[in-house]
Image: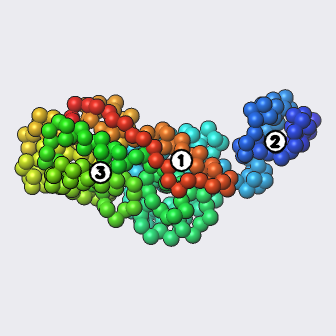
């Protein structure tokens, strides 16, 4: 008996071969009724779609590349896991590169992903002046990074998150508040956290104290920076950290200076990943909606792959995890 062909499935389902192909490749809008008829016909005929033939027909590899600084970071780790799951459910496999904020490594990963002819990229790491991002027609979606005028950006409401963090600290009486931040030359919506900090401090006639923490700093290097903060700011009574890892390290360093949290020092972090909330529930932090951001990134990338117009920036709301540190 000959193996059933795509036209056999189409004939049994009472649809065109194009419709069967669209079902197989999850392309375009199709009613659930039509999809079910095709699936039922495939099952009845024991039809197994040929992946190689399907790729040649659709000119797709059904693979998406992800580039992040490091999946060891709780935020990027949870984001990558959510993206992988949602892409898998959409019929795509994933290739992941950890750039470690090294522009040469990021460029090499990008070139290799392009050579593998992935159908699209979701990028959470971006070093400046990587020409390949501008010289490709490949669909790309950025998470928390501004790359160029064409690539859509998915982000949480960083300014509102900064306001929420500062409101918590100010309401608890903190006045000598330090903000730790990433490099200002990196184009990222996350810089709005710093803008919110500065606006809130100015509105309360308080001096701003900002320390930049390099993205590729080790925990040991970060601790040295945080020791410097505590040495140089004797009156410090509050910290708005740019992420939960930094907030946790600051709490550790504060203990070395006999500063108790929250009695002597109030601390608010940022990201609110499931891992941090599970293992450090006492940390007050701003929760980024990681699952929703991942879902929006995937749906936006699918739209780009299909040639649809997409918004340049999509901003999602944040919430507060109220722990005991602020």
Residue at mark 3: 196
Q: Bin the neighbour count of mark 3 within 10 Å (Cα to Cα): few under 14, some 14-19, many 20 and up.
A: many
Could you tell whether 103 is left or right of 305 in the image? Answer: left
The numbered disc on residue 36 is none
Residue 62 % position (x, y):
66, 49
N-term mark: 3 or 1:
3
Q: Residue at x 15, y 42 (%)?
A: 174
Residue 199 % position (x, y):
26, 53
Q: Within the image, what quadrant is residue 114 found in?
A: bottom right
- Nearer the observer: mark 1 or 2; the answer is 1
Residue at mark 2: 20
Residue 145 % position (x, y):
44, 57
Indicate the secondary structure of the residue bearing disc 3. Answer: helix
Residue at mark 1: 297
- 254 or 174: nearer the eye? 174
Mark 1 and mark 2: Cα distance apart in space: 27 Å
N-term mark: 3 or 2:
2
Can residue 288 be spotted in the picture? yes
Could you tell whether 107 is left or right of 193 in the image? Answer: right
């Amino acid at each position: 008996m000959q193996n059933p062909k795509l036209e056999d499935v189409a004939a049994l389902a009472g649809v065109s071969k194009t419709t069967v192909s669209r079902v197989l490749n999850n392309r375009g809008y199709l009613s659930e009724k039509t999809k079910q008829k095709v699936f039922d016909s495939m099952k009845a005929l024991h039809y197994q779609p040929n992946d190689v033939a399907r790729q040649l027909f659709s000119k797709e590899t059904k693979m998406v590349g992800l580039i992040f600084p490091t999946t060891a970071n709780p935020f990027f780790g949870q984001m990558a896991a959510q993206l992988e799951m949602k892409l898998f459910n959409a019929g795509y496999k994933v290739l992941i590169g950890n750039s470690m904020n090294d522009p040469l490594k990021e460029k090499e990963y990008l070139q290799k992903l392009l050579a593998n002819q992935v159908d699209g990229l979701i990028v959470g790491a971006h070093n400046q002046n990587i020409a390949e991002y501008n010289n490709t027609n490949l669909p790309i979606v950025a998470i928390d990074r501004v790359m160029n005028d064409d690539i859509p950006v998915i982000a949480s409401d960083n300014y509102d998150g900064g306001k929420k963090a500062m409101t918590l600290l100010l309401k608890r009486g903190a006045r000598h508040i330090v903000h730790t931040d990433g490099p200002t030359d990196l184009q990222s919506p996350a810089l709005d956290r710093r803008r919110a900090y500065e606006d809130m401090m100015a509105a309360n006639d308080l001096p701003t104290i900002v320390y930049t923490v390099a993205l590729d700093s080790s925990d040991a290097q970060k601790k040295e920076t945080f020791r410097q903060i505590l040495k140089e700011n004797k009156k410090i009574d509050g910290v708005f950290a740019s992420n939960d890892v930094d907030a946790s390290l600051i709490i550790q360093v504060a203990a070395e200076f006999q500063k108790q949290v929250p009695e002597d020092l109030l601390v608010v972090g940022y990201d609110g990943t499931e891992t941090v909330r599970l293992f450090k529930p006492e940390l007050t932090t701003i929760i980024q909606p990681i699952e929703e951001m991942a879902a929006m990134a995937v749906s936006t990338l699918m739209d780009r792959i299909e040639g649809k117009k997409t918004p340049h920036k999509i901003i999602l709301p944040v919430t507060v995890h109220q722990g005991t540190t602020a």
